[in-house]
Every structure is written in structure tokens, then in C-alpha cells.
Amino acid sequence: MDQIRTGKFIAELRKEHHLTQQQLGDRIGVTNKTVSRWENGNYMPDIDMLLILSQEFQVSVNELLSGKKLNDAEFRKNADENILAVSRQNVFSFAERKRFWISKWRKDHIALFVVMGIMDMIYLVCCFVFMEPVLIGLTGIIFVAEYGWQNNQMMIYVENHLYGNNNQGTV
């Protein structure tokens, strides 16, 4: 599936039907700028829009995704390739997926934050009750180490989910 080829094919079909980008957009419920972005290969129509376009131009969704009209043999070959290509595409961007997994890890590990917070409070109380300079001096180091450990565990979890390696041997 080639986004640029698909865009050129949409433009070709539109011109064959003697439509402007504005006219096509009006007929299918999008702006002329959206049509232009598809035709330039900047964006890919979503699945629902591919179905509408295929009906408008009397071609199959498979042909739209292939960027050309197909004979029977090509149709079968490209169908499998196009299904796999579309299934690999995510609706959400990488940054959105990353934010989701970070948020999920934090929600799933709220008990860890509570326990670590209680331990930190006990430690701080002990530091000031006993007024030991060594304990007070270690406070910053302990807090930074805790934060680093939690952040490391979170990023391992996030990367395992983002990159498909769900073998989680960590917290």
C-alpha cells in the first residue's frame, strides 16, 4: 500500500468523473483541502472514507489501496497485502500510544507510589527526630534513586508495549 500512489489514483478517478476537488468533497462530505491532501499523498483516507470513495468511483477498496485498477490475479494478490498494510497502521500516533501506556502504568502502580511516599515520610520524620547529618544528607540521594528506579520500570513497561515485546520480567 503506497499512500502517494493511492492519492494519485484518487486524483485520476476524480478527473475521469469530471469532478473538481470541491465537487468531490461536497459529494462525500469532506473539504476540498482534505481531497487535496489525499491526492498529494499527505494523508490517507480512513477506512469509512475509502468505502465511500470506492462507491463514488465504482472501484473496489482494494483498487483504491493499490492505486490502480486490478485484474483478477492482481486483485487477489493485492487484497492480502492491503489488508496486512491497513492492519499495521494505527489510528493513534506514536506519542499518543506512549502517553497511554505511561498513564496506564501510573494507574496500575498507584499502590507503589503510596507505599514509597509513606516510606519517604517515615524516613524524613526519622531524619528530623534523630537529627543525624548523615541521614539528612542521604535524603536527596534516596529520593533521586527512587524516582530513577520508578521511571526506569515505567519506561521498560512502556517500551515493551510500544514495540510489541510483552515479556515483562519487571514490576
Image (cartoon, rainbow, N blue to C red):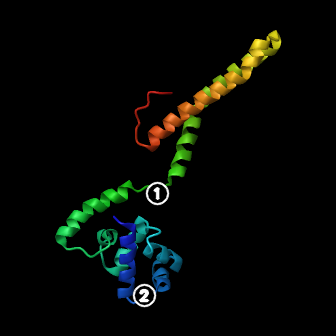
Residue 101 percent coordinates (x, y): 52, 42
**Mark 1 Cα within 10 Å, few/some/many (few <14, many 20+)?**
few
Q: Give how far apart the Cα atoms at labels 1 and 2 are.
A: 29 Å
Residue 90 percent coordinates (x, y): 44, 55
Give the position of the N terminus as an image quadrant: bottom left
Q: Mark 1 or mark 2: which comes first in sequence?
A: 2
Q: Residue 7 is drawn in which quadrant?
A: bottom left
Residue 171 is left or right of residue 73, and the answer is: right
Identity of the residue drawn at 54% across and 50% down: 95
- Is residue 99 among the parts visible in the rendering? yes
Q: Residue 62 is drawn in which quadrant?
A: bottom left
Identity of the residue drawn at 73% across and 17% down: 123
Please say if 56 is above or below 152.
Answer: below
Please say if 48 is above or below 53.
Answer: above
* SS state under label 1: loop
- Name the residue type under label 2: Leu
Q: Which mark is residue 91?
A: 1
